[in-house]
Image (tube, coloured by chain):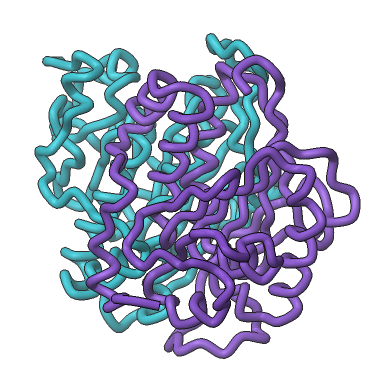
Chain colours: A purple, B cyan
Amino acid sequence: MTDAVTRIGVVIFPGFALLDVAGPMQFFNSLSAIRPFELSIIAKTMHPVSTTPPETIVLDNKHQFIGQAWLPTHTFDNVPDLDIILVPGGFGIRDETIFNETTTFIKEQYPKLKYLLSVCTGSIMVAAAGILDGRKATSNKRAWSLTIKHKTVNWIPKARWVVDGNIWSSSGVAAGMDMTYAFISTIFSPDIANQLANAMEYEPHTNPDWDPFCEIWKVTSQ
Amino acid sequence: MTDAVTRIGVVIFPGFALLDVAGPMQFFNSLSAIRPFELSIIAKTMHPVSTTPPETIVLDNKHQFIGQAWLPTHTFDNVPDLDIILVPGGFGIRDETIFNETTTFIKEQYPKLKYLLSVCTGSIMVAAAGILDGRKATSNKRAWSLTIKHKTVNWIPKARWVVDGNIWSSSGVAAGMDMTYAFISTIFSPDIANQLANAMEYEPHTNPDWDPFCEIWKVTSQ
């Protein structure tokens, strides 16, 4: 993937976690200066999509969430061929319609992809799409109780990120940056990954087993 | 600032660095669930604003940058009263018009603010607004040669972030997350900052003098 154009798609939905997308995309935005990329930002419709959780979801927030609205470039129905899809998590996945529509999209797209990347609770939708059956994956540690409902997956409790075949899954929110660093290091080169991290002034965790949040959130087993 | 509504504004412009804004805002988005916040996303016009550098800027990129478009909620001319403004950096500041308009806005707003936060090369515009004269600040390390043109500022080469009075400035891109963790710890509480970082699965650098990128980018003095 070093010379050909890399066609990357990012799925967004109301209530996606901002950093789930922005952490990995800061890497890919910078990488696109030195390797050719095409980006699709994919949503149900072309309307702006906010990180603010939709009103359909009951959460224990005391105050109204602030959020940021992003513009999609494509909808689920008119996506170009893609090499990579990035699936974020966030409170939005607790909306049944959002969950089901995103899961359906992932299921349709996966056979055509070179790689699927998920961050945080995004892996729960990847699991629901059936493509993690019998495979290893990880997810957000605070929301682990939602994760392990999908019993066909070999969920790894203590992991910053997990790779199984062409599916990369990271732990919660900020972990997506470490997964992306490792992904770029593997798929492009370690030098390029370092160059990007140095430009971002980001010190990545490079050990996939590093995960203090497993203990903090008392995730000890499936 | 623990009970009253915190009115936060984020300045965006074509070519802002995604993570400069998204890192800090992931903290504030989460914080807004437990403390009341109002967010303004401020740009020159209400049109979507992309992280892709504008075509007016000549950079050494081999390929076209991919980027993400955000929707403003306010323009420079109709901003509500604000407590905090976050000023990101990014390649966009190399456009003279963007630089001058953003600098003018910062200069107008600063006297009314409780706090001003800058990330990355955002501090160069804060410097140009004249409000860092005689004060300490830091900035992106790769772009340090641009920073030190503003000789009225006591630029700190080796710093993850710097606080002088009510102006907080961070080093490049990812450093904004560590500054924001420290800011929330100071202004709200250490417990709240930890709660947010644990939910984000982010391990902050808590020492403001930690800065390996000072050496990596050979920034040794002014």
Residue ID at (20%, 67%):
B187
Image quadrant for the C terminus of chain A?
A: bottom left
Can the viewer see residue A209? yes
| A91 versus A111 height, above or below | below
In the rendering, at what x and y percent does residue B17 appear? 48, 36
Residue B163 left/right relative to A52:
left
Can the viewer see residue B116? no
Residue ID at (29%, 68%):
A214
Please state which of residues B116 and A7 is positioned toward the viewer in this rendering. A7
Residue located farthest toward the front when viewing the structure as drawn: A134
| A111 versus A126 height, above or below | above
Residue ID at (55%, 51%):
A21
Q: Quadrant of residue A182?
A: top left
Please state which of residues B201 and A45 is positioned toward the viewer in this rendering. B201
So how many labels did they put on this image?
0
Residue B81 left/right relative to A215:
right
In the rendering, at what x and y percent does residue A105 appear? 78, 60
In the rendering, at what x and y percent does residue A148 appear? 49, 78
Q: Quadrant of residue A205?
A: top left
In the rendering, at what x and y percent does residue B133 appear? 20, 31
Please state which of residues A61 and A29 is positioned toward the viewer in this rendering. A29
Residue B32 left/right relative to B215:
right
Image quadrant for the N terminus of chain A?
A: top right
Residue located farthest toward the right when viewing the structure as drawn: A78
| A195 versus A129 height, above or below | above
Residue ID at (57%, 90%):
A58
